[in-house]
Image: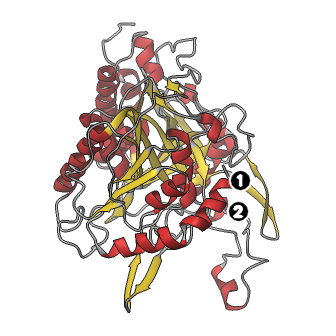
Amino acid sequence: MIKHKYDDFGDIIAQLKSIEDESIQSIISVLPLIERCFSLSQEVSYEKVSHSLLNFGNVLDECKRVLKKDGTVWLFVDNFNLDGEVIPLPFLVAEKAQEVGFFLRNIIIWYNSNAPCFLGPFLNRCSYILFLSKSKDYKFDKDPVREPHVWKEVEWGGGRRSRYNPKGKDPSNFWLKTESQKGRILRHVLLSVEEVVKRCILVSTSSGDKILDMFAENSCVTKVAREEGRISVFCYSKINYPKKPFFSINEKDWSEKKSPFNISKKFEKVYFKSCEDMGEIPDTCVQLVITSPPYWGLRDYNVRGQIGFGESYATYLSRLQKVMKECHRILRPEGSMWININKRIIQGNMILFPKDIIKIASEVGFVLKDIVIWHKPISVPTTGPRNFTDRHEYVLFFTKIKQGYFFNPASLKTSDYIYNGAKGPENVWKIFRKIGNIGKEIEVLIKEKKIKHTAVFPEELVKRIILLCSERGDIVLDPFAGSGTTIVVAEALGRIGVGYELNTDYGLIIKRRLENTTAKLLTWLNTNV
């Protein structure tokens, strides 16, 4: 076999061309993109991965041709750590699929104990499944994969009973079984790869439908499809995969100690101005940046100069990049930046904010170390009736340097699910939040003026990040302070909380929270540290 510099997927495309147009109801495949890169060379670069993704677009073109109009695609793909930096392959493959005309319906997180382990501070416990459709009208039936309700027999009665589907609760885009009794969760149960594949088959096909696996040597799709009474169609890679594993297992690239740092400058708690210019903050003095930026086109905060409303998406990203340049300037060499962001569906298609934020942050000089999955067991349905309920968000973990950044794994020894945390923290966190549009709504009444803020992330999320990546006396900054959650939690943990915020009204909320909430938070946080 002739070896090419880049993977052109010619072996797969040749087999796909023998399949007739619009004959396949569902395509389910585990993508061996990195394995194929390693089959060509033991040295894999970002350039080679990028060229493979470019050529994979030709495979997706063929998939679109053979798929029925109401067909769907389910692609299993994992992040990959290349020389100490995470390549977000699921987001990049999703982007390529959208470019060839597929609709990205959802991204499913499968809590997977056998997910690839790689260099980095967290144990990887998640695999990604991209859920795509060929058109806006697609075959989808969630009934076969519903699970028993947790709260039905305990909390809801009377008129509320009608809100419960007798067949079970709506399945979410976070896949992990939960066993419960009378509202009490007894345990979490891992799904096997066969069970996960079966879920994809049951929601997207009927008995007798054809299911295609493009890389049949890499999965159990063919076997499960036949067991469920479907017709299996398959392709095989005609290359030899490397026999030895190419993932580095949890090698230490961080430091649990950092050099002492003192600064005499006194900071305001909040600077009421745009964070595109944080000139009040000296270079390399901030240890940690934690923020959740405004979502493009989602909400008008009624303040002049706001980012994300009344402007193009390109302008939005350009302005966010200015903020990131300032964050990079003010961060200490061993410092880190954490960004909580989710996807958003507009006119039936998904905007991958995390993918674009990773791109502009990398251009500034940040290194993506991991993507933490924030699992929200309770949330407001936002994806529509013919989809999975949205139960997770992304928390992007960036550093200024690949090795030697500050990280304290001992601060997070417990697991939210099955494991005891003895091997180190995991990159999937279960954190509850109050029901709201994006988070819990905070409202105060000051001088007969009602002031409220809805986009509030939970204190527990901020606490974990602060404990992992800073020490007492360090400066923790939030460029989009909002109602001041980052500032309040930082102060309660003995850090110096600083923020930027355009809306001066939110200053009243922050002041009230610092006065009334910090003492209460301090007691709660110290009992959970």
The reply, left or right, for residue 22 in relation to residue 159 is left
The reply, left or right, for residue 335 in relation to residue 228 is left
**Residue at x-position 32% and y-position 76%:** 505
N-terminal of the pair, mark 2 or mark 1, is 2
Is residue 209 shown above or below 127? below
**Which mark is drawn over residue 15?**
none
Residue 421 location (% of width, % of height)? 70, 38
Between circles 2 and 1, the one closer to the viewer is: 1
Label 2 and label 1: CA atoms lie apart by 8 Å
Is residue 10 shown above or below 144? above
SS at mark 2? loop
SS at mark 1? strand
Its colouring scheme is secondary structure
**Residue at x-position 50% and y-position 29%:** 215
Judging depth in this view, the residue of 90 and 66 nearest the camera is: 90
Image quadrant where residue 146 sits: bottom right
Residue 526 location (% of width, % of height)? 66, 54
- Residue that label 1 marks: 177
Kind of residue sitting beneath label 1: Lys
Residue 151 location (% of width, % of height)? 73, 73
Kind of residue sitting beneath label 2: Glu
Q: Are marks 2 and 1 in contact (CB under 8 Å)?
A: yes
Judging depth in this view, the residue of 370 and 134 nearest the camera is: 370
Judging depth in this view, the residue of 429 and 104 nearest the camera is: 429
Q: Is residue 62 visible?
A: no
Q: Is residue 517 visible?
A: yes
- Residue that label 2 marks: 147
Image quadrant where residue 221 sits: top right
Tell me the quarter of the image containing the N terminus: top left
**Residue at x-position 58% and y-position 53%:** 174
Judging depth in this view, the residue of 320 and 190 nearest the camera is: 320
